[in-house]
Amino acid sequence: MEEFLDAARRLMPMPEMGPKEPLLEQYNRNYRYIVVIRRYKLIYLYENETCSILMAWDCRQNPNSLKNSDRFKSLNLES
């Protein structure tokens, strides 16, 4: 758990440090990620100078379940 908090703290001064999440590019929003503990991605949205952490993603899962997640579909409706 501490590793995730440390990763989130690293985003504070440089929220654009993480690359854009390629599996979420179809939503045309600034979804980014940083790797935590080698197999997890901390996925976040950076817009309007606000960084919102959305989820910790276990990279051992099927990538299509992230790409087709209802969570991101509903967030996209707000834009």
Image: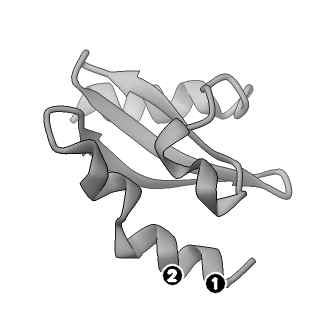
Near-viewer residue (67 or 12): 67
Residue 65 in which image quadrant: bottom left
Q: Residue at x 25, y 15 (%)?
A: 38
**Disc 2, disc 1: CB below 8 Å?**
yes
Spatial separation of the CA atoms under disc 2 and disc 1? 5 Å
Label 2 Cα neighbours within 10 Å, binned few <14 / some 14-19 / many ≥20: few
> Residue 78: x and y, percent?
68, 83
Q: Quadrant of the N terminus?
A: top left
Disc sitting over residue 64 in the figure? none
Q: Could you tell me which residue is drawn at 85 percent across and 58 percent down?
A: 48
Q: Amino acid at mark 1?
A: Leu
Asked which secondary structure carries label 1, the reply is helix
Question: Residue 77's spot in the image, x, y percent?
Answer: 64, 84
Disc 2 secondary structure class: helix
Q: Where's the C terminus, which quadrant?
A: bottom right
> Relative to 79, is 48 above or below?
above
| Mark carried by residue 77 | 1
3 or 55: nearer the viewer: 55
In this rendering, is residue 33 above or below 54?
Answer: above
Q: Disc number at residue 74? A: 2
Q: Is residue 23 left or right of residue 35?
A: right
Residue type pointed to by label 2: Ser
Q: Which residue in the rendered view is the most extreme toward the left?
A: 60
Q: Residue furthest top?
A: 38
Give me the residue at 54% from left, 48% from top: 44
Residue 68 is left or right of residue 73, and the answer is left
